Amino acid sequence: MAFEYEKYLRMDKIPHLWCPGCGIGIVLKAMIRAVDRMGWNKDDVAFVSGIGCTSRSPGYIDVNTLHTTHGRALTFATGIKMAQPTKHLIIFSGDGDATAIGGNHFIHACRRNIDMTYVIVNNNIYGMTGGQHSPTTPVGAFASTTAYGNIDPSFDICNLAEAAGATYVARTTVKKGKILENYIYNGFKNKGFSVIEAVSNCHTQFGSKNKMADPVKLINWINEREVPLAKAKLMTADELRNKVITGEYVTPEMEMTEWKYYNRSKSEYCESYDKIKETAQNMVKK
C-alpha cells in the first residue's frame, strides 16, 4: 500500500518551489515517514526553519510551523520547547543556515542537549542566495565567491555536533532515503538534542559551477565519495580527504566512558530547567 504523504502536506501549497531534481524533497519525505512511524498527533509537532532553500519546507507541512530568520531557527525552536515542553520539535536548515549564520546557536543547542531534532540538508553551497561558498564547500570546489577554487577547510558537521555535546548524531546521503528515514526516526526517539546531516545535491548552483549540472551526475558523485564510518576508522586522513563519511556517530546506547566525553551532559535541558524552577520556588516558600 502506497504511503499517504498528503496526510502531512498542505496540498494547496503544492507544487513546491524547489528546482526539479532537488534533494530536499527526499529529505522531507524521509522526515514525514519518520513522523508517521512515531505515531505523533500533528497538533503535537512543531516544525521550524531558518532561511534558505530548506526554509520553504514549513509552508508545505501540515503541522505547527514557523519560518524564522537566517541562522535563528534553533533560537525560535528553543523558545517553543521551553514554553511547550511536550511539543515535538523538528528543525530544518541548510549548511549555511546551520553552520555559518547560525553556527553559534548550533553548538550551544548541542551542549544544552535540549530535546529537539535538527535535520541539516548539506548541499555544500548557498543555493538560494546566489551560489556563494559555505562552511561545508569542499576544498578546491568552485562557487560564485570562489572563482579559482575554495581554500577554506570545510566543517565536518557530525564531528562538530559530537564534540559540542549532541546525544544523537548521524549522517547519510539523499541517495539512501530509507537509511535517512531510519536516522531521523532514531533522532526522534532520543531524549535530547539530535543532529541528522543529509548530504544533498544542489545541481543548480554547486553542480553548475563544478561541471555536474545534472542532478543524477551530482548525486552519483556524492555516492562515489561515500565511506561507511566503520571503514573510515581504519583509513588514514589522506585517504579520507574530501570523502563523505556516513553512519551513526553518537547514539544514546553508546558507552560515554572515553576521556573525550568527560564534560558531556547526561540530562535533558528542559528537565534540568524544571528542577531549577522547583528549587527556586521552594526557596521562596521558606
Image (spheres, rainbow, N blue to C red):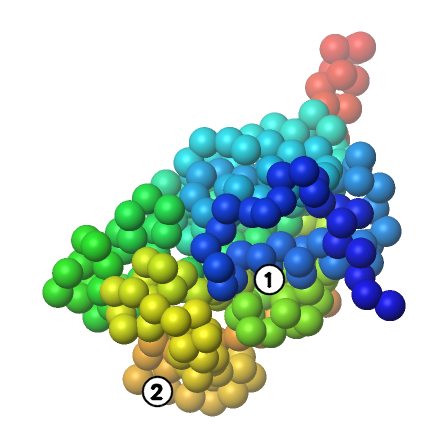
In this rendering, the label closer to the viewer, 2 or 1: 1
Observer-nearest of 229 and 127: 127
Q: Residue at x 43, y 44 (%)?
A: 52
Observer-nearest of 259 and 173: 173
Residue annotated with mark 2: 239
Question: What's the residue type where badge 2 is placed?
Answer: Glu
Query: Could you tell me residue 72's position as x and y percent?
Result: 47, 35
Residue farthest to the top? 285
Query: Could you tell me residue 69's position as x and y percent?
Result: 45, 31
Please, is residue 101 above or below residue 125 in the view?
above
Please, is residue 85 above or below residue 104 in the view?
above
- Number of callouts in the render? 2
Which badge, 2 or 1, comes first in the chain's sequence? 1
Observer-nearest of 233 and 280: 233
Find residue 212 and report its image quarter.
bottom left
Q: Residue at x 73, y 29 (%)?
A: 84
Observer-nearest of 93 and 161: 93
Left or right of 268, for residue 154: left
Q: Residue at x 83, y 46 (%)?
A: 40
Q: Quadrant of the C terminus?
A: top right
Residue annotated with mark 1: 26
Question: What's the residue type where badge 1 is placed?
Answer: Ile
Q: Is residue 53 visible?
A: yes
Q: Residue at x 74, y 59 (%)?
A: 33
Find residue 171 and report its image quarter.
bottom right
Find residue 85 and report its image quarter.
top right
Q: Is residue 222 visible?
A: no
Left or right of 278, for residue 166: left
